[in-house]
Amino acid sequence: MSQASEPSVHQRLLQLIQQNPGIGLAVLTTQTQLSADEVKRHLSVLESKGDIQVFHQSGVPQYYIRKRRRGRSGVRQRRSQEIRQQMYEVIEEQPGINLSGIAEHMQMSPQLAEYHLIQMEQKQQITGAKDEGGFYRRYYIKESKVGIHEKKIVALLHQEPLLRILLLLVKHKSLQHKELAQELQVHPSTLTYHINRLEEYDVIHVQPYGREKGYSLKDRKGITRILRRYYYSGIADRFDQLWVDLDPREE
């Protein structure tokens, strides 16, 4: 590929970016068998011509085809607006959802979903924030009144083991380690791992019961309120009976 003419290099780069929205420099370098500096030079030309656009996610450049406003541009623009409206509704219904969850719900590639999310963040329709562990970027409606502590709890709703523990502690008020492990059908050491994570979120009390430990929620009513407020399809499918057992008076 190193001996190819400039137009053929540009065509190849455009093809790769078209097929893989959000593609990075390293992959483009590998696919074209050119040096990173050469690829950067060609990308700069394409960007200056208005053929591509670049967005930086955590300082890493990602490349996309620039949509031209001619021909069927109006149709494409309306389609993009429809997609972003659907994404907005998903995030509104499931605050704290991450990229893979949105992509799965929308039945599109993570790269394409991320492209639309970047556009929505730039227009200040939504906001994204890393969770406590720093593993996932979670999305919220920009004007929502979700506080910092509430965002932490909302993030737990998307982690099945932690959600199950929260629901069980809401239902039973207090459980010993062995009782909770039995309810969850997990090894005690696995439960200890999840409990440590909940302690980091500062949502549970740990009490000694002889040689055992017991657990309860620090703010049971607050957790119940958050669970009900951000209840969405998916929780019901997996934890229907636990959900039904929540006492509405706890709110």
Image: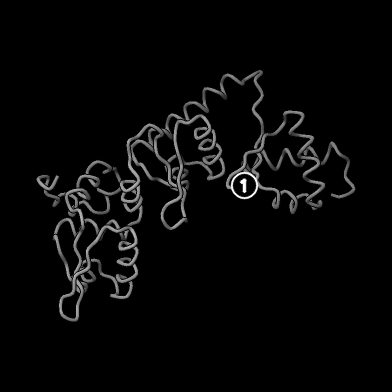
Look at 42% across and 32% down and name the residue there. Answer: 86
Q: Which residue is mark 1?
A: 59
Classify residue 50 by image quadrant: top right
Percent x, y of residue 39:
78, 46
Image quarter (top left, top right, bottom left or bottom right) of the C terminus:
top left
> Could you tell me residue 248's position as x and y percent?
12, 45
Q: Is residue 216 above or below residue 102?
A: below
Describe residue 235's horizontal placement relative to residue 246 as left or right: right
Q: Quadrant of residue 127?
A: top left
> Where in the figure is residue 88, as x and y percent of width and height?
41, 33
- In the image, 188 versus 244, the foreground residue is 188
Residue 136 lies, with reference to residue 232, above or below; the image says below
The x and y percentages for residue 120 are: 50, 33
Q: Residue at x 25, y 69 (%)?
A: 185
Estimate how packed mark 1 is, as few (under 14), some (14 to 19) or many (20 or more) residues with alpha carbons within 10 Å: few
- Going 70% across and 48% down the picture, which residue do you hit? 25
Residue drawn at (29%, 43%), measured in percent from left and top? 233
Q: Amino acid at mark 1?
A: Gly
Residue 249 lies left or right of residue 30; in this view the side is left
